[in-house]
Amino acid sequence: MGSFDFEYWRRLAESDPKAYFQLRERTLQSFIAQHPDQASSLSELQESIDAARVLAGTPVQACRDIMGQVGDHLSLLSVQLADLQREMASIKNFLASRARLR
């Protein structure tokens, strides 16, 4: 997606919304298909984004809602990372104590 042309997509959405949504769907499905190991997660993420867009009512509110979801996920990842770091420290201490006993 490094060659994303925002102006092209903006013009297409303004001039032919039906074509925009059809091409958007094909592009998203193509991207998901290129990542088979994450296809399920990516599809769920896209469904969540689409639902937020529909429920929000306005593009600005949709953006706020989606950014809120991103913030929630980042917070969860931060907690999980801290848990993993504590577990790693515990394992490291355990291995160090076993090495001292030898």
Image: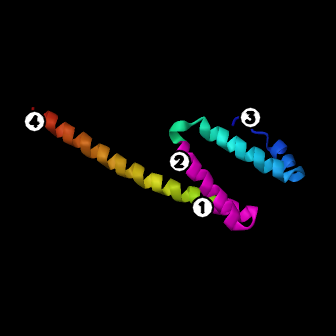
- Residue 2 lies in quadrant: top right
- What residue is shown with label 3? 3
Foreground tag (1 vs 2): 2
Foreground tag (4 vs 3): 3
Q: Are marks 2 and 4 in contact (CB under 8 Å)?
A: no
Mark 4 neighbour density, 10 Å: few (under 14) some (14–19) many (20 or more): few
Residue 43 coordinates in the image, percent (x, y): 58, 48
Residue 68 — which label? 1
- Which residue is at the far top? 102
- Magenta-colored stretch includes residue 57: yes
Q: Up-down: is 8 above or below 58?
A: above
> Which secondary structure, mark 3?
loop
Mark 2 neighbour density, 10 Å: few (under 14) some (14–19) many (20 or more): few
User: Going from the N terminus, do you reach mark 4 or mark 1 first?
Assistant: 1
Q: How far separated are the C-alphas under marks 4 and 1?
A: 50 Å
**Coloring applied to the structure:** rainbow
- What residue is shown with label 4? 101
| Residue type (three-letter) at the residue carrying disc 2 | Ser
User: Going from the N terminus, do you reach mark 1 or mark 2 first?
Assistant: 2
Seen from the viewer's position, the closer of residues 46 and 98 is 46
